[in-house]
Image (cartoon, rainbow, N blue to C red):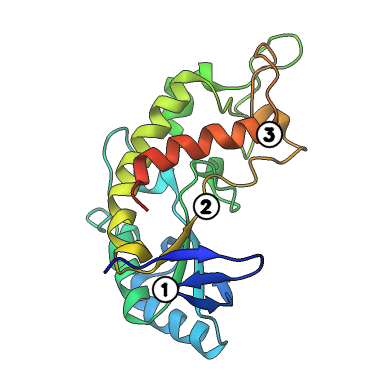
Amino acid sequence: MPRRITRNSSLYVLDGVKTPIYSGTLHFWRTQPRKWNDRLDDMKDAHCNTLDTYVAWNWHEPQQGKFDFNGTTDSRRNLGGFLELAEKKGFHVIIRPGPYICGEWRNGGIPDWLLHDHPEILSRDSEGKTLSLDAFYPPITYLHPSYLAYVEKWYDEACEVMRKHLFTKGGCIINVTIDDEPASEHEPCMAIESSSASMSTKQLQRKWIALFSSLLSPF
């Protein structure tokens, strides 16, 4: 029988059980795999029942079209292995596959090859000039067709791994959070070009959720 996730005003309801979330963050790719077990044990000792992690696009697709989610090129890329260990330890997982993750990580997770090969995705200033790449978090135009096309490819590959570990399929993932603070008012250039029609943050969120849901479905 399929497992179910619902929620009330303050709690997750997992298979009919009201479940408070006590969560900590563990960026698996910043930790050597040999230490994953100990880090998860530390979280258990701190009474966490849930872990939160990003999945960095530029880490798992360092070259265009060459994805690694099983640790072939670097053991720290073994997302599937990390999720299996989380399941073995009895954790719920909140997973955050970007595409933009912030996280004090290079380009916020946006691949270098995408930025250099497709400068058209960069935002523009009030005079229509492309903003500089010389920034820790490059100013991306979220709704540019070229950007969305590559994001869809990224989501397609990442979802193929995550789908196997959804709570509804017997796995650990109870929440998939797209992007990072997409409604942030202090970075409007991240959303739309100055030449684009006005779009509210709610409209932007709906567009992203629709794209992601179509790839991850059925949750």
Of labels 2 and 3, earlier in sequence is 2
Looking at numbered disc 3 in the image, what kind of residue is underneath it?
Thr
Residue marked by disc 3: 201
- Most foreground residue, 207 or 38: 207
Q: Position of residue 219 (x, y in %)?
A: 37, 53
For the residue pair 128 and 3, the one nearer the viewer reads as 3
Which residue in the protein does label 2 denote? 177
Circle 1 or circle 2, nearest the eye:
1
Q: Quadrant of the N terminus?
A: bottom left
x 52%, y 46%: residue = 178
State the image coordinates of residue 137 (x, y, percent, origin top left): 62, 38
Q: Amino acid at mark 1?
A: Asp
Residue 106, position as x, y percentages in the image: 54, 45
Whichever of callouts 3 and 1 sits on the residue coming sooner in the sequence is 1
Residue at the left extreme of this rendering:
72
132 sits to left or right of 5: right
